[in-house]
Amino acid sequence: MSPPRSSPGRRLTPAQKAAVLLISVGAEASAAVYRNLQDEEIEEVTRELVSLRNVESATVHEVIEEF
């Protein structure tokens, strides 16, 4: 029997999850979220946004469900 696989969303850091969520909700909602972040948080999430590549739809769904 193989070990249980972890779900894709569970392997992401909080900043990566925030980046996935911001991409998913669109520009207007993302701007509203950014207005409530501290400068350090903005930098961290923005770094993750830039580095995101090919996020699987299952991962996006899990991050949204977790939120």
Image (spheres, rainbow, N blue to C red):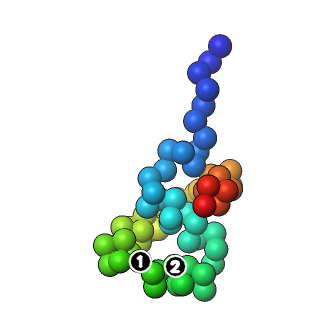
Would residue 19 be visible to someone looking at this image?
A: yes
Residue linked to disc 2: 33
Mark 2: amino acid: Val
Q: Where 59 sits versus 20, above or below?
A: above
Rendered residue at 58%/36% (across/down): 6
Disc 1 packing (10 Å; few <14; some 14–19; many ≥20): few
- Residue found 50% across the figure and 44% down from its top: 11
Tell me: 38 left or right of 49.
Answer: left
Which quadrant of the figure contains the C terminus? bottom right
Front residue of this view, candidates 54 and 15: 15
The kind of residue on which mark 1 rests is Leu
- Residue lying at the far left of the rendered structure: 40
Q: Position of residue 50 (x, y in %)?
A: 44, 68
Res. 42 image quadrant: bottom left
Q: Is the residue 61 above or below the residue 11 in the image?
A: below
Q: Secondary structure at mark 2?
A: helix
Q: Quadrant of the N terminus?
A: top right
Q: Position of residue 57 (x, y in %)?
A: 68, 55
Q: Does residue 60 appear in the picture of this structure?
A: no
CB atoms of marks 2 and 1 within 8 Å: yes
Q: Secondary structure at mark 1?
A: loop
Q: Residue at x 36, y 71 (%)?
A: 41
Task: Give residue 37's mark.
Answer: 1
Q: How many numbered marks, from 0 up?
A: 2
> Gap between marks 2 and 1, in whole Å?
7 Å
